[in-house]
Image (cartoon, rainbow, N blue to C red):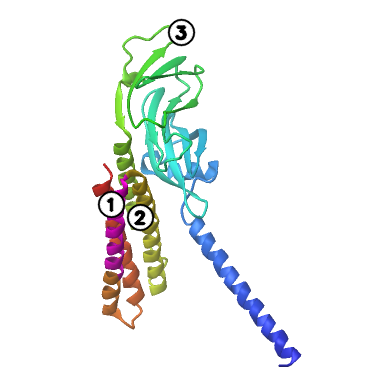
């Protein structure tokens, strides 16, 4: 082999490496930037305003709290207390999973984290005060625990109260004090003071995942092809499948923490059978278009649809 041939071969290898590198970077960028995210305050506001109930409202971020892979954001929407919950994906982006708002100048939100953390609680009570707040102090009673929180008057604020991690079910009650430190009798939830609340952690977790499933379904339904080409259509179906597959893995991982060893062993066997069924069904459906441009399109579309159905099955059947 001549020196010129060797140089040409090295050049070809460098070109191939650069092309592969470019494709990898482009793919990572497209996946990481495809969704509006909560990576910074600007994108958080954009995400909030993309949600129907916050559309065309003024948004004021009060506080951002990161716990592991999750981000909790307290904000005001037209001066009403609200929060949004993000979860960080494998690309490092925060995608929103739930959001809520309340009436009143002092409101409470019960926020369960989707991922249990060994050294931290997975349940927060978020208290948001607006500029109209006239309550100076609150006593939060959670089972036998008492938490005392103080607020600045006529100033927006967010207070995060962590619940003890060793307990699952809580009964909440509140006492409030005015600017003179006097107990406010007969506190009314319609006037910013919540009445007694009962919440169970597992129920909240199931409701949270059902909401996340519905949000994902809406998100996938809004995915549209950029043109009528088979390539564009395949990208849409592939994006749908990736969304549902990622959520399926998240649900399956959560069930690994909830179920007993015996129940999880049965679920593993069931899941293996389901994966075989899913792949066989997709392959059989695609054979109708064997050799055609729609073969792979049909294959991925069936994968996405069956994975969506499986996500709902796992949450409905195994989360209580």
With 248 as the anchor, is 87 left or right in this view? right
Q: Please indicate, yes or no, whether residue 305 appears anywhere in the rendered image.
A: no
Query: Which-is-in-front pick, marks 3 and 2?
Result: 2
Spot occupied by residue 60 in the image (x, y as percentages of width and height): 50, 33
Residue marked by disc 2: 248
Residue drawn at 45 percent across, 40 percent down: 117
> In which quadrant of the rendered image does the C terminus lie?
top left
Q: Mark 3 to mark 2: distance in Å?
A: 50 Å
Residue drawn at 33 percent across, 63 percent down: 304
Would you say residue 275 sits in the magenta stretch?
A: yes
Q: Are marks 3 and 2 in contact (CB under 8 Å)?
A: no
Q: Earlier in the sequence, mark 1 or mark 2?
A: 2
Q: Main secondary structure of the magenta part?
A: helix
Residue 148 vertical position relative to residue 228 in the rendered view, above or below: above
Q: Mark 1 to mark 2: distance in Å?
A: 9 Å
Graded by Cα atoms within 10 Å as few (under 14), some (14 to 19) or many (20 or more), the crowding at tag 1 reads some
Residue 314 is marked as: 1
Q: Please indicate, yes or no, whether residue 10 appears anywhere in the rendered image.
A: yes
Would you say residue 184 sits in the magenta stretch?
A: no
- Magenta region: 259-279
Residue 181 is marked as: 3
């Amino acid at each position: 082999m001549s020196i010129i041939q060797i140089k040409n071969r090295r050049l070809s290898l460098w070109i191939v490496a650069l092309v592969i590198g470019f494709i990898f970077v482009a793919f990572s960028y497209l996946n990481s930037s495809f969704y509006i995210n909560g990576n910074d305050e600007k994108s958080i506001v954009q995400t909030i305003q993309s949600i129907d109930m916050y559309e065309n409202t003024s948004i004021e971020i009060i506080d951002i709290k990161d716990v592991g892979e999750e981000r909790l954001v307290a904000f005001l929407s037209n001066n009403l207390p609200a929060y949004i919950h993000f979860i960080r994906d494998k690309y490092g982006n925060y995608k929103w999973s739930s959001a809520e708002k309340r009436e009143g100048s002092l409101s409470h939100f019960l926020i369960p984290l989707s991922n249990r953390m060994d050294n931290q609680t997975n349940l927060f009570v978020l208290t948001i005060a607006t500029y109209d707040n006239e309550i100076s102090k609150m006593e939060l009673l959670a089972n036998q625990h008492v938490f005392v929180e103080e607020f600045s008057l006529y100033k927006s604020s967010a207070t995060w109260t962590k619940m003890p991690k060793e307990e699952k079910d809580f009964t909440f009650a509140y006492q409030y004090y005015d600017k003179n430190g006097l107990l406010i009798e007969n506190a009314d939830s319609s006037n910013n003071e919540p009445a007694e609340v009962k919440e169970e952690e597992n129920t909240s977790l199931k409701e949270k995942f059902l909401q996340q499933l519905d949000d994902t379904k809406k998100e996938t339904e809004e995915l549209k092809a950029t043109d009528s080409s088979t390539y564009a259509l395949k990208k849409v179906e592939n994006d749908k499948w990736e969304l549902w597959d990622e959520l399926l893995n998240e649900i399956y991982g959560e069930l690994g923490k909830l179920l007993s060893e015996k129940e999880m062993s049965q679920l593993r066997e069931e899941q293996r059978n389901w994966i075989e069924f899913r792949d066989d069904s997709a392959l059989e459906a695609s054979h109708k278009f064997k050799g055609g441009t729609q073969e792979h399109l049909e294959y991925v579309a069936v994968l996405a649809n069956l994975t969506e159905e499986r996500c709902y099955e796992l949450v409905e059947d195994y989360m209580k």
